[in-house]
Image (spheres, coloured by chain):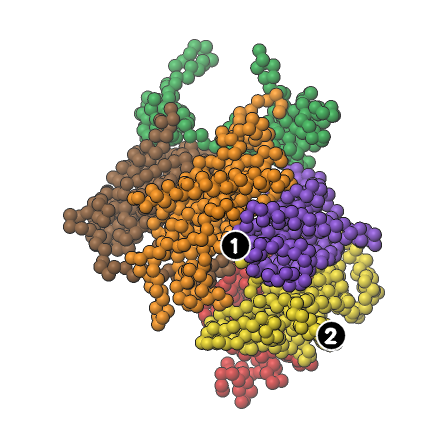
C-alpha cells in the first residue's frame, strides 16, 4: 500500500531467520520455579507512575519487567458525534509501537488493535460514572512500547488506563485492576510472558473491582477443564487485590509527599 | 486589560501573547528558565529489548522513544550494494490534544522528511555497510520514533533519539544462503554500526522580533512562529540550518544561534557519554 | 474552497437563444474546434496542449520494475490523473469527483484497453525486469472540454517519449545507457486514439441542437454530452453517451462521421508538432544539452 | 570541477529567468522559470472557507504543492509548510478575515532548485492576484561543491555531486532572511559566504520581477 | 467447438443460443420490505437486486437542488459474485463510472421537477456476474422505480450486442466479453425510439456501428416486452388481491 | 488526614449522607475520586427559624481537578466566534474560574441577550466577533452547543477591541468607549462587578 504520508522503505522486507540454540527452553526447573525466579502464581513486579503527559488530563505509565505501556486520558471534552447523548461516552484506542513486538508491526491500525480497544472499552465502562458527564467524551489513548505476552499486555493496559482515568479526576465507582493467566499442560501460569505464551493451550484475562467485589470483564480462550478455570479465576482475583494496593499507592504517594 | 484581574491560567488561555510578553519583559520564561537555558535533557539507551537498538530521550517534559528494527530486503536495481534506512515519526493523539487519530499529520510528515534529509545529506551512516550479499540481500533499518509526551521542540528530541539509537544498534552476523535465497543470522556475534558523524541539534524561536528563546516549550511554540534549527557535528561543522516563518531574522541572530548550538553539542555529547559508560558497566 | 461560480439563469437563456440561431459566443461554427496548440517540451515525453484556454500538461517517465505476476512478459503503463484545485476549484481532495472518474476511465479505455502502446516490447527480462511507463497528467486550466485536451496531450507525450537504451549484461543485470552514449528508443505506438466531445442542448422534432468541443459555459448548460474516441485507422475505440438527453440513432451515426473528419485534422496537427520537436532535438543532440531524464523520480538524495 | 559550469555560466550567475503572468485565468497566476526549472502557481482567493479551518481575524492560507512526476509525498508536504509559513509572515491576512487564500503550485519542469522557483512563482502570482502584502519573498538556491566553490542556482546535475545544498528566501525591503534550508556538511564561514552570494543574486531576481511587472502594466494585462 | 471460437459451425453460440437470442430473463418486483420500491432480475447467470428509497429528505444540505430531486446511484459488487474473489478497494473506478452513467440515464427520465429539494436513492447489488453489468443495472433500476411508484416518462431498457467477423451477436455473457470482441451497450426508450445510453469499449469500425446498434435496439425492445409484461402481471394480481370480485 | 482513591469504602450509609466526590451503594458510602475525606454539618435554618441539625455530610475534596464541563447554572467566559442574525456562537473557554483544556461551543440566542424588550434585540448591536463574554448556561441545548444567556446585569461583554484596535471600556450597560479614539460602540456590556466593593 503506497502510503504517501510516510517515508517509503522497500516494498517487501522480511525478518531474518535467527538461528537459535537447538535445545528447547525449559519453562519450569525442578523446584517449580519459572525462568526469572518467580513461582507459578507470582505476578511480575509492577512499576506504576502517574502524571507522565503534561498536556493530558490524566496519564499513567506501567512497567512489568519487560512490558512497557503508556496511557493518556483526554476529557471530558465536547462530543463530535451529531447525536445528543444524555450520558458521556468513552472512546478507547490502543496502538502497538512498530518496534514493540519481535515481528515489526505495520504503522496503520490492524484488526488485533481494534479488538483489544473494544475489550478495554468493555472492561472500563462499568467503573466510570458516565452519567455525570452529559454531551462529553472521554478519550483514552494507549501505546504499547514493548510487548512481552499479549494477554498480560491487555491486563496491564486495563490497569494502567484505570489509573490514568482516576488521575484525570473523573468520578469512578472503583479502580479496575486486571490480571492474566495461561494454561500450560495442566498448570496455571500467572502473568505469563511471550515465551510461556507461545506454549499455552488457553489463556484468561480478568478485570475486577476489588472493593465492590464485582468482575467487570472476563476473557477466556482455548479449551480448559472447568475446575482449572475456577482455580484460575480464584488466583486472578487474589493477584488483582495485590495490584489494587499498588494502584492506590501510585495515586496517593505523590499527593502525600507534596503535602 | 480591563480592571478585571484573572488567575494566571485563565489569562494564559485568553491572551497567550500578552502572557508571554509579560514574562519576557523580566528576561525570564514561564517555566522559570532564562532565555539561553536548555531544559534538563536525559538519554537512556537499550530500553526496549525487542529492538536491535533503542533509546529514550527526555528534554524537559518532551519524551520520545526511538526503536530500530532490522529486516532484510532486496536492494534497488540501480544501487545493488545499498541498504535502506527508513526514519518515521509517529505523533499519536496520546502525546498532545493537538493531534487527531488517523494518518500522520502534516507536522509528523515534515519531521520525518527533515530527519530523512539529514540522514541522506550528512552521510551519517554509509548505506553500503548494510550490504549482506550484493544484488540480492541487504539490511533495512526501520527507525520508528514514537512521541510519548509533546511539550515543544520535538525535532531536537527525535534527532537525538535517532542518533543515540543508531549508536546503540547491534546487528546479528548474517549470511546469505545462495540456494534457498534465505538470510540466516546468528545471535552470538553482534556487530555495531560505524557512524561516520554524530550530529546533535539545537532549536531556537524568535518572539516579537527581539527575544531569542532557546529550546521553546509548547506554550512558547504556539505563540512564537519563527523557528531556527541548527544541527552541528563533533568537528564544529554544521549539518543543517532550517529557518522558517517570520521576517525578523538577521545574520547576527544566526551567528548567536550557531555559537549556542556548538555549546549545546558539547552538553549533549557529555550526557550521551556518561549514559554509555553507565550502560556498559552493568 | 468555494464552489465554482454558477451561471445565472439569464446567462443560460442568452447562450441557449444564441445557439438556436446558430451563433456561439466565441463565434465558432457549430462543428469547429477551438485553436489547438501542442508544445512538445525540451525533454522527451513532455507535452503541453492548449485547446482555446483549456491547458493540460502530460509528462511521461519510465522506470525498471518487476512485472505483474499474471502478465510476466508485458510492460506496465500507469495513467495518473490527479485533479488539482487549480483546474477544478472547490474540490476537496478526498473522494474522487465525477469529472475525474470519467476522465481517467475514458483515457484508460482509450489507451490501455485498446493497446494503443505495445506493452510486449517493454519487456526486458521475463518475470524479472520490465519497463514501467508512467504518464502524469496535470490539468492546468479548465475552460471546458478538458477530456479532449487530456487525450491529445497524453497520446502526443507518449509518441514523443524516448526511453533509454539498455543492454542485458548477465543473468538478471542490465546497464542503462544515458542519452549521450546511445540515443534513446521511442515507444511502439499501434494507433493514435483521439477523443471528440459533443454537447447536446434541446432536442426538438425538427432540429437537434448540439455543438462540438463545448467551452466552459456550454458545458455547464448542456442537457447531455457524448464522447467518441476514434483512431487513425477510422476505428471507434470508445463511444460513451452516458445518459443525458435521449437521441435518435441517426444523430449518433451522423456525429460519429463528423468525429472521424475532426480526428484526421487533429492527428495531422500532432504529426506536425512531432516533426518540429524531432528536428529541434536532432540538431540539439550534438551539444547534448537536453537532459535525458534518468527515469527514476529524481529527488535530492 | 571544470573552471566554468556545464552550461558556460559563471559561478555566481543565475539561469535566464522568464516570467509569464495570467498563464491560467484564476484570480492570479504566474509561471516562473529558472532556465529549465518551471513552476506554475495559481492563487484562488480570498474565497469561501470551510467552517472547520475558518480563522476569526485573518485569512486562512492553504498551499498545495503538486510534483512533476508521481503523487505528492512527504517531500511535497515539507515544501507546502515552508511556503505557507513564509506567506503567513508577508501577506496582510488581517485585511480579509474569515476567508481562504488557496495557493496551488504545479511543477512543470524540474531541473534543480525547485523550491526557490516555487517561492518566486508564488510571489509573482500573489502580485498578479492583487493580494495586499507587507513585503515580497524572493528565493535563490546554491550548492557548495566538493572543492569548496559555491555555485548559485544549480542545475540538476550540479546538485547530484555536491557537498551541501542551500535554499535562501529573502524579503525585498530589508533583505532579511525569510526562510533558509541547508542540508549537507559545511563550515560556518562557507554558510555565510553562501548567504552573501545568494543575497546579491536575490537582488537580481528582484530587478527581474520589477521589469516583469512594469512590462505587464505598460502593455495591459 | 474450440474455446476461442464464439460462433459454432451451425451458427449456435457456446451456450447454445442463436446469434440474435437474448439470455432468458426472469424478474420479480417488490422483493424487499424496507425499501419504497425494489426488484430482482436475472439475465442468464447475471443476477442483480435493486432497491429505491425516496423521494426523501436530502442528507447533506449542500447538495439540495431547489427545483428538482437529486438522484444518487450506488452499485456494489458482492465479493462472491465473480469466479475468483478479489478484494474490492474502496473506490472502484469501474463501478463508480457505471453508477454515474446510470444516474445520468435516469435524470431526464424521472420527472424530478415534481419533487424539489428531495433525494431519490437507487442501490444496486450484483449478486452474480456473468457479463452485461451496465444493462442489468439499468433494467433492475427501471423495474424498481416503477415498483416505487415514481413517475417516469417511459421505461428504460438496455441490452448489449457484439460483432464477430460481421455476424452480430446479442446479449454477451462473460466468456464472450472477455474475448475482446467489439461490444456495445444500448439503453432505449421503447415508445419514442430514442437512445439515452450508448457505451462502446473495444475497437469497432465506424460503418459497422449502425448494424450492431440496430441489433442491440431489437434486443432492448424484447427486454421491454418482458419487463412490461412482468409489471403488468404484478399489478394485475395486486388488484386481484385487493378486491377479489 | 485520610487520603482515599475511587472505590474506598468510607462509612455506613446510615451515619452520613453522600456529598460530592462520594456515592452510595448497598448501605455503604464509597469515595468516587482521589482526595481527602472531610465531613461537615450544614447549618440550614428552616422556615421555622431554629437551626435543625441535618445529618452529617461526608465529602472527598478533589485533589485531581477534572477539567470542568459546563452545567446548567454555571457562569462561563467565552469568545464570540461566529454571528448570525438570530444568535451569536460562543466558544466557551472558562467554566466558573477553571479554564477547560478544550473549548466547548455555546449559543446566545437573540431572545436571551437581555431581560427587557426581548424581541427588539438586534444581535449585531449586542456582540461583535472577538468579544470576550461572560454568560450563564441556561440549558444543555442540542448535540452541538449549550444554550447561554446574558439576561442579567453582571453578564455580557467584559472585553472588546474597538474598530481602531484599542481596548474598550464600558460606559453604560449598552455602549462601550474606545480608550484611544473615544468612539462609542454599541455592546451589551456586563456591569464591571465589584469595582467598588473590592476597594472598600
Where, quadrant-wise, is the C terminus of chain E in this rendering?
bottom right
Q: Chain A is drawn in which colour?
A: brown
Q: Quadrant of residue D100?
A: top right
> Which labelled disc corresponds to residue C272?
2
**Chain letter matching colour purple:** D
- Same subunit: marks 2 and 1: no
> Which residue, as the protein is rendered here, is positioned at the far front?
D3
Tell me the residue at 37%/21% (across/down).
F38
**Chain letter matching colour red:** E
x and y percentages locating residue B205 in the rendered image = 56, 38
**SS at mark 1 in the image:** helix
**Chain letter matching colour orange:** B
> Which residue, as the protein is rendered here, is positioned at the far bottom?
E9
Residue marked by disc 1: B121
Q: Can residue D53 be seen in this view?
A: no
Tell me the residue at 64%/44% (across/down).
D178
Q: In which quarter of the image is residue A57?
A: top left
Relative to residue F8, is residue E30 drawn left or right?
A: right
Amino acid at each position: 500500500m503506497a502510503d504517501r504520508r510516510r517515508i517509503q522503505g522497500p516494498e517487501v522486507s522480511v525478518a531474518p531467520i535467527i538461528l537459535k540454540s537447538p535445545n528447547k527452553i525449559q519453562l519450569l526447573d525442578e523446584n517449580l520455579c519459572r525462568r526469572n525466579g518467580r513461582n507459578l502464581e507470582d505476578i511480575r513486579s509492577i512499576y506504576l507512575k502517574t502524571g507522565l503527559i503534561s498536556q493530558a488530563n490524566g496519564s499513567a505509565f506501567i512497567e512489568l519487567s519487560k512490558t512497557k505501556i503508556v496511557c493518556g486520558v483526554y476529557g471530558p471534552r465536547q462530543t463530535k458525534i451529531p447525536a445528543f447523548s444524555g450520558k458521556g461516552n468513552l472512546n478507547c484506542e490502543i496502538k502497538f509501537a512498530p518496534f514493540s513486538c519481535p515481528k515489526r508491526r505495520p504503522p496503520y491500525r490492524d484488526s488485533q488493535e481494534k479488538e483489544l480497544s473494544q475489550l478495554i472499552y468493555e472492561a472500563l465502562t462499568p467503573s466510570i460514572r458516565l452519567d455525570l458527564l452529559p454531551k462529553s467524551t472521554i478519550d483514552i489513548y494507549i501505546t504499547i512500547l514493548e510487548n512481552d505476552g499479549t494477554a498480560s499486555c491487555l491486563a496491564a493496559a486495563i490497569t494502567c488506563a484505570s489509573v490514568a482515568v482516576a488521575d484525570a479526576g473523573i468520578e469512578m465507582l472503583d479502580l479496575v485492576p486486571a490480571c492474566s493467566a495461561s494454561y500450560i499442560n495442566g498448570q496455571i501460569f500467572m502473568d505469563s510472558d511471550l515465551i510461556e505464551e507461545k506454549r499455552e493451550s488457553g489463556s484468561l484475562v480478568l478485570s475486577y473491582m476489588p472493593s465492590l467485589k464485582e468482575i467487570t470483564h472476563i476473557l477466556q480462550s482455548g479449551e480448559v477443564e472447568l475446575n482449572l478455570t475456577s482455580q484460575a479465576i480464584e488466583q486472578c482475583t487474589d493477584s488483582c487485590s495485590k495490584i489494587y494496593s499498588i494502584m492506590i499507592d501510585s495515586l496517593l504517594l505523590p499527593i502525600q509527599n507534596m503535602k | 486589560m480591563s480592571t478585571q484581574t484573572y488567575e494566571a491560567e485563565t489569562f494564559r488561555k485568553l491572551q497567550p501573547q500578552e502572557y508571554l510578553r509579560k514574562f519576557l519583559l523580566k528576561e525570564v520564561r514561564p517555566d522559570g528558565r532564562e532565555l539561553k537555558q536548555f531544559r534538563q535533557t536525559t538519554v537512556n539507551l537499550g530500553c526496549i529489548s525487542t529492538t536491535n537498538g533503542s533509546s529514550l530521550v527526555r528534554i524537559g517534559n518532551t519524551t520520545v522513544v526511538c526503536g530500530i528494527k532490522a529486516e532484510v530486503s532486496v536492494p534497488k536495481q540501480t544501487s545493488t550494494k545499498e541498504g535502506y534506512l527508513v526514519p518515521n515519526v509517529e505523533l499519536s493523539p496520546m502525546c498532545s490534544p493537538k493531534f487527531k487519530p488517523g494518518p500522520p499529520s502534516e507536522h509528523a510528515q515534515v519531521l520525518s522528511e527533515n530527519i530523512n534529509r539529514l540522514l541522506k545529506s550528512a552521510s551519517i551512516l554509509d548505506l553500503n555497510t548494510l550490504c549482506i550479499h550484493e544484488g540480492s540481500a541487504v539490511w533495512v533499518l526501520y527507525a520508528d520514533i514514537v512521541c510519548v509526551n509533546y511539550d515543544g521542540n520535538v525535532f531536537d528530541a527525535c534527532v537525538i533519539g535517532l542518533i543515540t539509537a543508531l549508536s546503540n544498534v547491534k546487528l546479528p552476523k548474517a549470511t546469505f544462503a545462495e540456494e534457498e535465497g534465505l538470510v540466516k543470522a546468528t545471535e552470538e556475534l553482534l556487530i555495531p554500526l560505524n557512524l561516520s558523524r554524530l550530529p546533535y541539534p539545537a532549536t531556537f524561536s524568535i518572539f516579537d522580533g527581539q527575544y531569542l528563546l532557546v529550546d521553546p516549550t509548547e506554550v512558547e511554540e504556539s505563540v512564537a512562529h519563527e523557528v531556527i534549527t541548527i544541527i552541528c557535528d563533533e568537528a564544529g561543522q554544521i549539518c543543517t540550518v532550517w529557518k522558517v516563518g517570520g521576517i525578523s531574522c538577521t545574520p547576527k541572530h544566526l551567528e548567536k544561534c550557531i555559537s549556542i548550538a556548538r555549546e549545546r553539542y558539547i552538553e549533549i555529547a557529555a550526557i550521551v557519554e556518561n549514559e554509555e559508560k553507565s550502560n556498559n558497566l552493568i | 474552497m468555494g464552489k465554482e461560480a454558477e451561471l445565472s439563469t439569464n446567462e443560460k437563456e442568452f447562450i441557449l437563444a444564441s445557439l438556436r440561431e446558430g451563433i456561439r459566443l466565441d463565434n465558432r461554427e457549430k462543428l469547429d474546434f477551438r485553436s489547438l496548440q501542442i508544445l512538445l517540451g525540451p525533454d522527451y515525453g513532455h507535452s503541453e496542449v492548449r485547446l482555446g484556454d483549456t491547458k493540460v500538461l502530460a509528462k511521461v517517465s519510465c522506470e525498471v520494475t518487476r512485472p505483474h505476476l499474471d502478465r510476466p512478459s508485458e510492460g506496465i503503463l500507469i495513467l495518473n490523473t490527479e485533479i488539482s484545485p487549480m483546474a477544478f476549484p472547490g474540490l476537496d481532495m478526498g473522494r474522487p469527483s465525477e469529472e475525474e472518474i470519467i476522465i481517467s476511465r475514458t483515457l484508460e479505455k482509450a489507451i490501455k484497453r485498446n493497446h494503443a502502446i505495445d506493452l510486449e516490447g517493454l519487456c526486458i527480462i521475463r518475470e524479472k525486469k520490465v519497463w514501467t511507463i508512467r504518464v502524469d497528467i496535470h490539468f492546468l486550466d479548465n475552460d471546458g472540454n478538458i477530456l479532449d485536451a487530456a487525450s491529445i496531450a497524453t497520446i502526443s507525450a507518449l509518441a514523443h517519449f524516448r526511453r533509454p537504451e539498455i543492454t542485458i549484461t548477465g543473468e538478471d543485470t542490465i546497464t542503462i545507457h544515458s542519452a549521450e552514449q546511445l540515443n534513446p528508443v521511442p515507444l511502439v505506438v499501434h494507433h493514435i486514439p483521439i477523443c471528440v466531445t459533443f454537447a447536446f442542448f434541446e432536442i426538438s422534432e425538427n432540429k437537434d441542437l448540439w455543438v462540438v468541443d463545448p467551452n466552459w459555459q456550454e458545458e455547464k448548460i448542456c442537457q447531455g454530452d457524448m464522447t467518441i474516441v476514434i483512431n487513425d485507422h477510422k476505428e471507434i475505440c470508445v463511444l460513451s453517451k452516458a445518459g443525458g438527453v435521449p437521441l435518435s440513432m441517426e444523430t449518433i451515426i451522423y456525429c460519429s462521421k463528423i468525429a472521424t473528419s475532426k480526428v484526421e485534422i487533429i492527428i495531422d496537427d500532432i504529426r506536425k508538432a512531432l516533426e518540429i520537436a524531432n528536428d529541434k532535438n536532432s540538431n540539439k543532440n550534438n551539444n547534448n544539452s537536453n537532459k535525458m531524464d534518468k527515469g527514476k523520480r529524481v529527488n535530492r538524495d | 570541477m571544470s573552471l566554468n559550469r556545464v552550461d558556460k555560466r559563471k559561478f555566481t550567475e543565475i539561469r535566464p529567468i522568464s516570467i509569464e503572468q495570467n498563464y491560467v485565468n484564476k484570480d492570479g497566476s504566474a509561471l516562473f522559470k529558472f532556465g529549465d526549472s518551471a513552476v506554475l502557481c495559481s492563487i484562488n482567493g480570498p474565497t469561501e472557507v470551510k467552517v472547520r479551518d475558518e480563522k476569526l481575524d485573518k485569512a486562512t492560507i492553504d498551499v498545495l504543492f503538486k510534483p512533476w512526476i508521481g503523487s505528492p509525498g512527504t517531500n511535497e508536504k515539507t515544501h507546502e509548510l515552508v511556503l505557507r509559513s513564509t506567506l503567513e509572515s508577508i501577506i496582510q491576512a488581517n485585511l480579509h478575515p474569515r476567508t481562504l487564500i488557496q495557493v496551488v503550485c504545479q511543477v512543470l519542469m524540474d531541473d534543480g532548485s525547485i523550491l526557490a522557483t516555487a517561492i518566486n512563482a508564488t510571489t509573482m502570482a500573489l502580485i498578479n492576484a492583487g493580494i495586499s502584502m507587507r513585503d515580497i519573498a524572493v528565493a535563490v538556491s546554491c550548492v557548495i561543491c566538493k572543492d569548496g566553490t559555491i555555485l548559485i542556482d544549480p542545475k540538476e546535475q550540479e546538485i547530484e555531486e555536491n557537498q551541501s545544498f542551500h535554499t535562501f528566501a529573502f524579503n525585498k525591503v530589508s533583505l532579511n532572511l525569510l526562510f533558509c534550508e541547508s542540508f549537507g556538511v559545511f563550515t560556518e564561514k562557507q554558510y555565510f559566504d553562501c548567504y552573501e552570494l545568494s543575497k546579491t543574486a536575490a537582488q537580481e531576481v528582484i530587478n527581474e520581477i520589477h521589469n516583469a511587472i512594469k512590462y505587464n502594466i505598460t502593455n495591459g494585462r | 467447438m474450440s474455446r476461442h471460437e464464439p460462433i459454432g459451425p451451425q451458427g449456435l453460440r457456446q451456450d447454445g443460443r442463436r446469434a440474435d437470442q437474448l439470455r432468458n430473463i426472469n424478474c420479480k418486483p417488490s422483493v424487499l420490505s424496507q425499501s419504497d420500491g425494489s426488484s430482482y432480475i436475472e439475465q442468464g447467470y447475471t443476477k442483480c437486486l435493486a432497491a429505491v428509497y425516496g423521494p426523501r429528505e436530502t442528507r447533506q444540505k449542500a447538495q439540495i437542488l431547489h427545483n428538482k430531486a437529486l438522484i444518487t446511484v450506488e452499485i456494489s459488487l458482492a465479493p462472491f459474485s465473480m469466479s475468483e474473489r478479489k478484494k474490492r478497494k474502496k473506490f472502484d473506478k469501474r463501478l463508480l463510472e457505471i453508477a454515474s452513467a446510470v444516474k445520468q440515464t435516469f435524470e431526464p427520465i424521472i420527472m424530478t421537477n415534481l419533487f424539489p429539494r428531495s433525494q431519490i436513492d437507487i442501490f444496486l447489488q450484483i449478486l452474480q456476474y456473468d457479463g452485461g453489468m451496465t444493462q442489468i443495472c439499468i433494467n433492475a433500476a427501471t423495474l424498481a422505480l416503477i415498483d416505487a411508484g415514481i413517475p417516469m416518462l417511459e421505461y428504460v431498457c438496455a441490452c448489449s450486442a457484439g460483432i464477430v467477423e460481421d455476424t452480430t451477436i446479442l446479449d454477451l455473457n462473460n466468456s464472450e466479453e472477455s474475448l475482446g470482441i467489439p461490444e456495445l451497450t444500448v439503453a432505449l426508450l421503447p415508445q419514442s425510439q430514442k437512445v439515452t445510453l450508448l457505451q462502446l469499449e473495444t475497437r469497432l469500425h465506424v460503418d459497422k456501428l449502425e448494424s450492431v446498434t440496430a441489433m442491440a435496439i431489437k434486443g432492448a425492445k424484447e427486454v421491454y416486452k418482458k419487463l412490461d409484461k412482468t409489471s403488468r402481471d404484478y399489478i394485475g394480481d395486486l388488484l386481484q388481491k385487493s378486491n377479489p370480485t | 488526614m485520610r487520603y482515599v482513591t475511587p472505590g474506598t469504602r468510607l462509612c455506613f450509609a446510615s451515619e452520613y449522607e453522600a456529598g460530592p466526590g462520594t456515592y452510595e451503594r448497598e448501605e455503604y458510602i464509597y469515595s468516587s475520586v482521589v482526595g481527602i475525606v472531610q465531613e461537615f454539618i450544614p447549618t440550614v435554618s428552616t422556615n421555622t427559624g431554629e437551626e435543625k441539625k441535618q445529618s452529617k455530610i461526608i465529602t472527598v475534596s478533589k485533589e485531581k481537578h477534572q477539567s470542568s464541563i459546563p452545567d446548567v447554572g454555571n457562569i462561563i467566559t467565552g469568545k464570540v466566534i461566529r454571528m448570525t442574525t438570530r444568535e451569536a456562537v460562543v466558544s466557551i473557554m472558562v467554566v466558573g474560574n477553571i479554564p477547560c483544556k478544550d473549548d466547548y461551543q455555546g449559543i446566545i440566542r437573540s431572545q436571551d441577550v437581555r431581560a427587557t424588550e426581548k424581541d427588539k434585540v438586534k444581535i449585531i448591536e449586542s456582540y461583535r466577533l472577538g468579544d470576550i463574554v461572560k454568560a450563564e448556561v441556561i440549558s444543555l441545548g442540542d448535540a452541538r452547543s449549550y444554550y447561554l444567556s446574558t439576561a442579567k446585569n453582571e453578564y455580557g461583554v467584559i472585553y472588546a477591541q474597538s474598530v481602531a484596535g484599542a481596548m474598550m471600556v464600558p460606559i453604560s450597560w449598552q455602549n462601550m468607549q474606545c480608550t484611544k479614539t473615544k468612539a462609542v460602540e454599541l455592546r451589551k456590556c456586563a456591569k464591571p462587578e465589584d469595582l467598588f466593593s473590592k476597594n472598600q
